[in-house]
């Protein structure tokens, strides 16, 4: 199966993190991506999952502000029956997922939607409740000066010695 994410518009430079998450995953694991945009990173992750032959579910969540954006994403991700595309605010989605009697656990959670300090801080707090004890949480734009709230929220949430970095991304759990 050949990658095609480079033909999708958008930003994406965390291929290595996706690939490591798939390598560490086992059958039955579930991944969560918060911030789909046009699905560039989602397409990369879906291909990696398919190539691995592992039974991994992938949920990707976005508010999809453009009315045609979700349909565009589905047009190139619909062929993967293990990918679920959800239209929702990430905080609302995380609150819903943590509100039941049985709270699901995700082996990999990637954050790249709203870059506001308060939003990222709340997102991390809620996502930690869903992270598998051996899971990976990561996010984009840590070192992007245009989004300083991301780095501030990440450093408030984690000890710096528990973090790794790759390109503009931060990683917890490696």
Image (tube, helix red, strand yellow):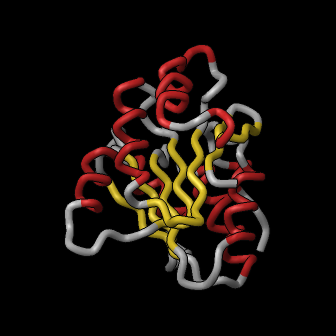
| Residue placed most toward the observer, 56 or 161 | 161
Q: Quadrant of residue 148?
A: top right
Q: Quadrant of residue 121?
A: top left
Give the residue at x 65% y 42%. Answer: 162
Does 126 appear above or below 66?
A: below
Give the residue at x 66% y 37%. Answer: 169
Give the residue at x 58% y 57%. Answer: 42
Query: What x and y, as percent, mark residue 109?
Result: 52, 55
Quadrant of image for the C terminus: bottom right
| Residue placed most toward the observer, 76 or 23 | 23
Query: What x and y, as percent, mark residue 160?
Result: 64, 33
Query: What x and y, as percent, mark residue 14?
Result: 71, 45
Give the residue at x 51% y 40%. Answer: 112
| Residue placed most toward the observer, 132 or 77 | 132
Q: Is residue 139 left or right of residue 52?
A: left
Does 106 appear above or below 119?
A: below
């Amino acid at each position: 199966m050949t990658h095609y994410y480079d033909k999708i518009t958008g930003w994406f430079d965390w291929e290595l993190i996706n690939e490591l998450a798939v390598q560490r995953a086992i059958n039955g694991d579930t991944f969560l991506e918060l911030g789909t945009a046009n699905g560039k990173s989602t397409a990369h992750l879906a291909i990696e999952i398919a190539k691995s032959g592992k039974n991994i579910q992938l949920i990707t969540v976005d508010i999809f502000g453009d009315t045609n954006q979700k349909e565009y994403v589905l047009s190139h991700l619909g062929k993967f029956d293990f990918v679920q595309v959800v239209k929702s605010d990430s905080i609302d989605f995380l609150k819903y997922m943590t509100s039941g009697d049985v709270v699901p656990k995700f082996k990999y959670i990637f954050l790249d939607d709203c870059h506001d300090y308060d939003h990222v801080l709340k997102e991390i707090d809620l996502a930690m409740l869903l992270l598998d004890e051996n899971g990976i949480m990561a996010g984009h734009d840590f070192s992007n000066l245009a989004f300083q709230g991301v780095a501030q929220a990440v450093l408030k949430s984690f000890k710096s010695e528990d973090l790794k970095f790759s390109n503009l991304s931060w990683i917890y759990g490696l």
